[in-house]
DNA sequence: GCAAATTACTTGACTTTGTCAAGTGATTCT
DNA sequence: AGAATCACTTGACAAAGTCAAGTAATTTGC
């Protein structure tokens, strides 16, 4: 079962659940169509029929009749627009507000009931997961932001490095130990005046990282722990991280920047080459249980 | 906006997206109702009308007419049950199979299109998130499993410890550095013959952890890094981890087990007390920027 | 072992919902 | 100022959904 099948399975499962929730509206004595109109008007009073057609994807003729009935039943109030006499602005009457409040309350109760048998933290967990999905699918794309290390970030860097390199590229466990040492050293001994790290994140979701530390020579900075999540690649995020790191190093008085990587990281190497790094050495090594070609790159700042 | 509102917002957003997908079926020349029947029969041939009523939540009269039309159009084949002559078993005809294949293909294409503007890793990310949600909501609850540390786990332990203690309890950054040191030491120097760790997980989701390492005295084990995710609490998971750890220590020839914790961890302390641990000392200390009461507990194995 | 109850489905009569095209005024474009 | 567009309404249907009353097969209860 691939990813798309997983999503399809979720859709079947979830629409069945939502269907149960929808049914809760039906015994309010109003049709689902009317309730949907009430919902929209509660969210944004003054909408016109046209707006509702666009937002609810219903036929305008049908909506017209539906609105007529709702006015007759006292759910909504129609007001001819003063700016444009073709338009009719729609508002909820007090009875409409009341219906909305009741439906919201039922909807919330229904969702709470879905979590009744799950654990206490389940709501938070699901809410976060669904919010993440919504953002990925374009519900409201928050911008990517960059911050210094916050509590938990160091662990995340270690976790994702280990998972990528050991899980996908076949490095052995010694790699994780090495990275743990690098991170522990950084946390314990870093010089905040010249060393720092960046985490790229969207809301609470971490997307990538880069570290700038002192290099082996004087006035030399070293770039480390550079990574962009697979899910966030192709958005020039790596370039932004690299620029932050390089600019910081230059700003702090470093004259060169070096980094070590492996030949197999084509995308990263291409990025280095495009940004003024020069390949200094390239040699086959036996590391982490694999035959690798280790490269060192340098850039004059 | 609380968690339930977040879920409600997702529902609005997601149903709108699914609506677009459903529309794709309509120009197959068949109604959504018929397509839904075809889907179910593809999944489980030989269903009866009754089964479909239950699964699709449709009126049986309407379904009866719909099935009649589908048989006339050559989509399905009806076969009187041999075991019970009241029942009619329903099967897809070759044409029905073909329609199903086409719809599946369109559905998949539609989902793929939803991800067109998102990054390449987005599908995986969303699939995992939705699968997690489905499991939490009871789609198919996988059992919790326990494993030794796998690559990435060490980083996760560090991350979640830092987030819980620094984020929720107000510890300062020195706590994260301390934990990073503990983890680095464990990875580098542990004695696999007597020391190990457990990760509680459901599929790829980590739920908790516990470490058993050598203690300060001879024949003494030490319990460390014990944690259960808030979302997974209340399921006796902590007890299971504790038992694994204690049993291992006893099995490896340790005679006592000690642990250090803070008084504020009521739930954990109660668990220790219930499982044969005895409070050895309790003293106020200034640690991690807070006034805490540090406790040591010991159990005879 | 047989009438009564139940089950699986069908049918008829009906309401609601959805669709399409042809209206009516109001407004904008040029 | 005349044509085009826009916001909405209406009419004529088609499709989908609802409810109750069927029919035949199978269980149940005594």
Image (cartoon, coloured by chain):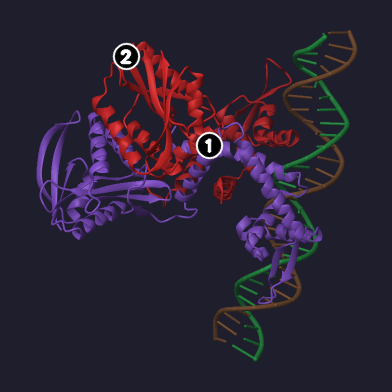
Chain colours: A red, B purple, C green, D brown
Which quarter of the figure is the C terminus of chain B placed in? Answer: bottom left
Q: Is residue A99 visible?
A: no
- Using the image, determine if residue D2 lies above or below residue B174: above
Q: Are marks 1 and 2 on the same chain?
A: no
Picture coordinates of residue A137, whole percent (x, y): 56, 34
Q: Nearer the viewer, residue A46 or A59?
A: A59
Q: Is residue B11 visible?
A: yes
- Using the image, determine if residue A139 lies above or below residue A244: below
Q: Report which quarter residue A294 is drawn in.
A: top left
**Which residue does the image show at 13% across and 57% down from the upper left?**
B255
Residue corresponding to mark 1: B121
Q: Numbered disc 1: what chain?
A: B
- Using the image, determine if residue B190 lies above or below residue B288: below
Picture coordinates of residue B248, whole percent (x, y): 23, 57
Q: Secondary structure at mark 1?
A: loop
Q: Nearer the viewer, mark 1 or mark 2?
A: 2
Q: Residues within 10 Å of mark 1 (few under 14, many from 20)?
A: some
Q: Residues within 10 Å of mark 2 (few under 14, many from 20)?
A: some
Q: Report which quarter residue B162 is drawn in.
A: top left
Numbered tag placed on residue B277 in the rendering: none
**Which residue does the image show at 35% across and 36% down from the upper left?**
A158
Q: Report which quarter residue A183 is drawn in.
A: top left
Q: CA distance from mark 1 to mark 2?
A: 38 Å
Q: Numbered disc 2: what chain?
A: A
Residue corresponding to mark 2: A219
Left or right side of B64 for B154: left
């Amino acid at each position: 079962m691939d990813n798309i099948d997983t999503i399809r399975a979720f859709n079947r499962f979830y629409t069945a659940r939502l269907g149960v929730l929808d049914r809760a509206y039906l015994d309010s004595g109003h049709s689902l169509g009317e309730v949907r109109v009430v919902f929209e008007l509660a969210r944004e009073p003054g909408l016109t029929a046209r707006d509702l057609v666009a937002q609810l994807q219903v036929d305008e003729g049908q909506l017209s009749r539906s609105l007529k009935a709702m006015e007759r039943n006292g759910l909504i109030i129609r007001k001819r627009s003063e700016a444009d006499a073709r338009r009719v602005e729609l508002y909820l009457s007090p009875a409409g507000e009341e219906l909305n409040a009741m439906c919201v309350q039922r909807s919330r109760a229904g969702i709470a009931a879905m979590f009744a048998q799950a654990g206490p933290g389940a709501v938070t967990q699901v809410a976060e997961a669904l919010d993440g999905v919504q953002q990925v699918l374009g519900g409201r794309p928050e911008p990517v932001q960059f911050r210094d290390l916050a509590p938990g970030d160091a662990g995340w860097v270690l976790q994702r490095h280990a998972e990528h390199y050991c899980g996908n590229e076949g490095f052995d466990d010694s790699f994780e130990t090495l990275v743990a040492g690098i991170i522990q050293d950084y946390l314990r001994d870093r010089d905040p005046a010249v060393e720092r790290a960046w985490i790229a994140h969207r809301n609470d979701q971490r997307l990538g990282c880069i570290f700038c530390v002192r290099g082996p020579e004087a006035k030399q900075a070293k770039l480390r722990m550079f990574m962009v999540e697979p899910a966030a690649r192709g958005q020039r995020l790596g370039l932004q991280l690299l620029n932050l790191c390089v600019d910081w190093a230059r700003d702090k008085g470093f004259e060169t920047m070096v980094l070590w990587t492996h030949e197999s990281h084509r995308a990263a190497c291409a990025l280095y080459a495009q940004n003024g790094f020069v390949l200094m050495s390239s040699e086959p090594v036996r590391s982490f249980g694999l035959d690798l070609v280790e490269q060192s790159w340098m850039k004059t700042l």
